[in-house]
Image: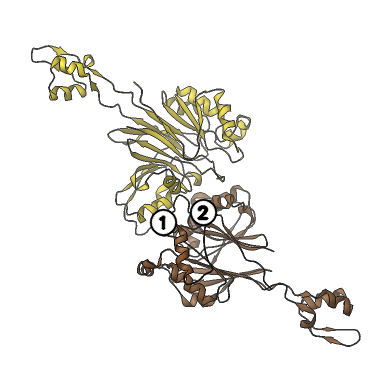
Chain colours: A yellow, B brown
Amino acid sequence: MSFSVTILGSASARPTANRHPSAQIVNLEEQYYLVDAGEGTQQQMVRAGINPLKLRGIFISHLHGDHVFGLFPLISTLGLGGRKTPLDVYAPAPFGEILESHLKFFDKDLPYEVVWHETHTTRHELLFENRTLEVWSIPLRHRVPCAGFLFREKQPPLNVDKEKISELGLSIAQITAAKRGEDLTLDDGRIIPNEAITYIPYKARSYAYLSDTNFSAKAATLCTGVDLMYHEATYAADEQRNARDRGHATTLDAAKAALKAGAKRLIIGHYSSRYKDEEVLVREAQTVFAETYAAVEGKTFEIEKQK
Amino acid sequence: MSFSVTILGSASARPTANRHPSAQIVNLEEQYYLVDAGEGTQQQMVRAGINPLKLRGIFISHLHGDHVFGLFPLISTLGLGGRKTPLDVYAPAPFGEILESHLKFFDKDLPYEVVWHETHTTRHELLFENRTLEVWSIPLRHRVPCAGFLFREKQPPLNVDKEKISELGLSIAQITAAKRGEDLTLDDGRIIPNEAITYIPYKARSYAYLSDTNFSAKAATLCTGVDLMYHEATYAADEQRNARDRGHATTLDAAKAALKAGAKRLIIGHYSSRYKDEEVLVREAQTVFAETYAAVEGKTFEIEKQK
């Protein structure tokens, strides 16, 4: 049961020869979610070996081109690929109008439906939920309405201690009840508290995607205890003023956010094209938050299970 | 005085890990023209070392996404780069509406003007002209209105024979007149016919871009004598029927067009993603037209001067 994040793009607005604009894949148990979709997303998915037909949902933080221009070619290609399943896209307004315009000019006969779910970038709200996952919006501070996303794995079912099963001679019905968290009443009348025979197989994991934004203590707080945080770091620390004026973050802003959230690990990205070597930025962030890593195209960050 | 074509994309609608959708750069004397603009064009230009700010004009054959989705991110990036010079885009209708929609949603404050020149895809007409170049439309046969482009270098100024200059003692005014093609009257009354003292330094060169299209004898005829022809070859010869039904060409269609035009060299491209090795397609075309070459990302075809 993998929970991982694959970087498709680490650039800010201007791509370089090696860096693509923002896009990531969150993979939970072979269910794929696309987070932002800069130009070239579909080709980056091919390179990462991810079949775009398997996408379960797309989350767009804001409507700047470097986060969304790759979505429309992808929509077209999914049509060519014969997708029939509706495609859910979570994005702020006026995405609906942009989509309508795209469909009118380029995809009049799309064989599947693109379903827009409007996100409200000032609210922390549940956007998506299925058996294993919740996705929440995280309000951010950018030049245009923008929200990050918190991917929260649901608590996995309880495991029942094998030795207790044979010691107490539990039936399948009793085991199933115990997995659900119920206390058991045995045939001899003894009551067995649930916690005496079950244990959590591993802690539910989480990933926070914060881009594009100024430092926001509130956003960081909403990600408290997150296993892995991505925070944009468009600039080095000596460009603090520039970053603030443009609604972006520095390496130290990103590190402070991870520290504030008590995150286990931090990925930085969305590098300005002026920085040729992202490791310089990583080292700067590491002075505040040691567990900082660089977003690099094609790199996958696995969130391991922990008891 | 270079005249070259650089391939930015050789894929058809679906990009592969290595192939980008259609885009090419025509470079005449360090003046750059973009021909079609599939997704990723701006990054492919960076990789080819071509500064997008230097673009003199953009020619779009038709409004399928794989030929135009890269134009809008490029327009945005040119704005970030501070372009002030108007950008001329030659494309069929309703490009104006698509552009308007893009500007409304993504580039309200673009610091330069994008000037749309409507092409009429059923006419062979002069679209663009400057001191050194003419660009003509070539009507094609695709599923939607589509025209290729013929880039015709203008005949370079005549050279005056150096030995004749000293033998006849020509003045600078007389040399300039001779370069313009005039006959000369010497001080002693002798009339010197222009062709006796001048010669063509090299023949004007030409490049034809034919994509997407069924085989069209008419289009080929309009390219008669072309130095270099690009013709789409989406399919191998055994997919002739499929190609015809979809408004595309096979390897042999492309070769026949080059033969019919009397082209010197042929580039094929726009390969269906089913073909992993384009050399197989090239060898097939070479059975009809020996001088066939593969479009490959980053490859530049130089058109040498010939006397």
Q: Earlier in the sequence, mark 2 or mark 1?
A: 2
> Nearest the camera: A167 or A269?
A167
User: On the rendered structure, is B171 left or right of A10?
Assistant: right
Q: How far apart, in angstroms, are the residues tagged by discs 2 and 1?
A: 24 Å
User: On the rendered structure, is A74 left or right of A142?
Assistant: left
The kind of residue tagged 1 is Ser
Quarter of the image with the C terminus of chain A in it: top left
Few, some or many C-alpha atoms within 10 Å of disc 2 (few <14, some 14-19, many ≥20)?
many
The kind of residue tagged 2 is Phe
Quarter-wise, where is residue A179 in the image? top left
> Nearest the camera: B154 or B260?
B260
Tell me the mark number nearer the camera, choosing from 2 and 1. Answer: 1
Quarter of the image with the N terminus of chain A in it: top left
Expressed as whole percent of the image width and height from the top left, the position of residue A74 reads: 41, 50
- Which chain is indicated by disc 1? B
- Which chain is indicated by disc 2? B
Q: Which residue is mark 2?
A: B72
Q: How many numbered marks does the figure carry?
A: 2
Expressed as whole percent of the image width and height from the top left, the position of residue A78 reads: 36, 52
> Nearest the camera: B244 or A195?
B244
Expressed as whole percent of the image width and height from the top left, the position of residue B139 reads: 49, 73
Asked if one can make out residue B283 in the rendered structure from this viewpoint, the answer is yes
User: On the rendered structure, is A290 left or right of B4?
Assistant: left
Farthest residue, direction left: A187
Q: Secondary structure at mark 1?
A: loop
Q: Which residue is mark 1?
A: B273
